[in-house]
Amino acid sequence: MKLIVKKPAFPWFGMDIGGTLVKLVYFEPKDFTAEEEEVESLKSIRHFLTSNVAYGNTGIRDVHLELKNLTMCGRKGNLHFIRFPTQDMLGFIQMGRDKNFSSLHTTLCATGGGAYKFEDDFRTIANLKLQKLDELDCLIQGLLYVDSVGFNGHPECYFFENPSDPESENCVKKTCCLDNHFPMLLVNIGSGVSMLAVYSKDNYKRVTGTSLGGGTFLGLCCLLTGCETFEEALEMAAKGDSSNVDKLVKDIYGGDYERFGLQGSTVASSFGHMMSKEKRDSISKEDLARATLVTITNNIGSIARMCAVNEKIERVVFVGNFLRINTVSTKLLAYAMDFWSKGQLKALFLEHEGYFGAVGAFLELLKMTDDL
């Protein structure tokens, strides 16, 4: 019996089913064969995914993140990035059934907690099996791959110049190359947060984490402001003033606390002003959203900095969908790393923030072989 390594059948997908969002990557081949063009269900899936930028009320294809002209397993094409809320997962599975996906595939590569949670639904509704993959393995492999191919001729990685004044126009985004990747502290901010000390592509450990992540921010904002979506919460936060909610060092000391180098604008007590009825009566929903965002971000930055010091790692890379369209938090994290380390730590960010787990699952699909 001869072992022949075959390319997996199209369509090529990778999925990361998180606690809040499902992230999906889809490889669109540009060199379809005549035989492939004749498969109606394959054409239908391709047309549906690439002809739309929105799917229903909640599904989004992040067109600006598309990676173009890739060669994978000898095939040329583009890699698309799609997301939708995890609460809509059953609708996605039913769509797969309606488009007769099981006639093309019997197995999908998936990572994240939802790969376990929805495994039975995929099997019973769509006649599909999930190949469940470790999410942290997928995260690292996906990150290293996307960084290696770059972002359509530009670096994937960026940082903020002059982070000491995040509100200033001088604090600007700059691209950079993520050379000499290791060691790095990889901070993955999704619904919750995991922090990994990564020493090579196959050698890493989870140092710690926190349950206070993107899910916490959105959940609290929904309670405090009545907002419904992450986008709405961020829009409110961008207009708010957290100093109306948080008690600052200057509120306690009347200015800077010079002995310990604490500026008067430093948060001393998150939501500390809310003990006062007068303050509670005067704040806006936008102030509450901003204070919630600052509280969550500062906590993540503080833990990340301590982990970096403990592990003796100077490169801190932040990823995850919490950072999507979230310039407030990226600048705050850049400031926190720079200020508390006295310039020794630099916060690095990546353009494809929350999609690396899905990319890692996709790469595992390409490694699949058949015994013939």
Image: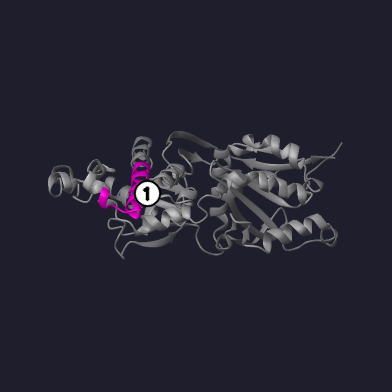
Q: Is residue 285 magenta?
A: yes
Residue 368 picture location, percent across and down:
73, 42
Q: Residue at x 24, y 40 (%)?
A: 275
Q: Is residue 360 visible?
A: no
Q: Is residue 123 left or right of residue 83?
A: right
Looking at the image, which residue is at 15% across and 45% down? 257
Asked where in the image residue 166 lies, by quadrant, the reply is bottom left
Q: Nearer the viewer, residue 23 or 343?
A: 23
Residue 130 pos. (x, y %): 70, 38
Q: Which element type, helix, strand or loop, lies under badge 1?
A: helix
Residue drawn at (68%, 62%) of the image: 50
Start-end of magenta stretch: 281-301
Q: Residues within 10 Å of mark 1 (few under 14, many from 20)?
A: many
- Amino acid at the residue labelled 1: Leu
**Tally of numbered tags:** 1
Quarter of the image where the C terminus is located: top right
Relative image position of residue 354 (x, y in whole percent): 52, 49
For residue 155, side relative to residue 290 (left or right): right
Res. 112 image quadrant: top right
Residue that mark 1 sits on: 293
State which quarter of the image contains the N terminus: top right
Of 283 and 341, nearer the camera is 283
Q: Is residue 312 above or below residue 242?
A: above
Q: Position of residue 263 (x, y in %)?
A: 19, 49
Residue appearing at x 49%, y 49% in the figure: 321
| Residue 125, image quadrant | top right
**Front residue of this view, candidates 204 and 191:** 191
Is residue 41 something that shows in the picture?
A: yes
Position of 41 relative to 97 (above/below): below
